[in-house]
Amino acid sequence: MITTVITSTITSITTTSMMVFGVGLGLVAVIALIVFLFARQLATASSSNSPRFLARSLDVSIVPLLIAFAMIVGIKAVEILG
């Protein structure tokens, strides 16, 4: 009996901590995406070549963050609809 209680308690705590970690990680990804998009817009507004190179370089980090954002939105939509 006590083993079952301990096992279910540990499972519950682990699941909750992983959910909090996932939400925190998703929040960091979304904030990073916003910052990178903002920096890219500022860099493309410049007329010199150096900021334009920075804007193209930021695409390397923006694309995976956009994919992560799409996954987050998709998972949240499935949670709401399901």
Image (cartoon, helix red, strand yellow):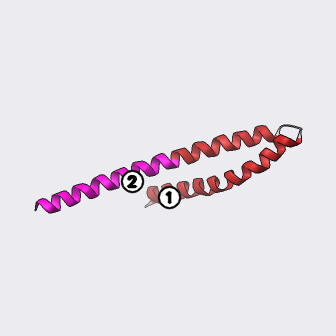
Q: Amino acid at mark 1?
A: Ile
Question: In the drawing, does residue 15 fall left or right of residue 3?
Answer: right
Residue 76 in percent (x, y) is at 49, 54
- Label 1: state its secondary structure: helix
Extent of the magenta region:
1-26
Quadrant of the image containing the N terminus: bottom left
Residue 18: numbered disc: 2
Is residue 22 left or right of 55 when viewed as pictured?
Answer: left
Residue at the (65%, 40%) spot, across then down:
35
Q: Residue at x 76, y 41 (%)?
A: 41
Kind of residue indicated by mark 2:
Met
Q: Is residue 62 magenta?
A: no
Q: Secondary structure at mark 2?
A: helix
How far across and how far down the image is residue 38, in percent? 70, 39
Q: Going by the image, does 38 lie left or right of 11?
A: right
**Number of marks present in the image shown:** 2
Q: Position of residue 5 (x, y in %)?
A: 16, 58
Q: Earlier in the sequence, mark 1 or mark 2?
A: 2
Tell me what residue is drawn at x 83 percent, y 38 percent. 45
Which mark is drawn over residue 62?
none
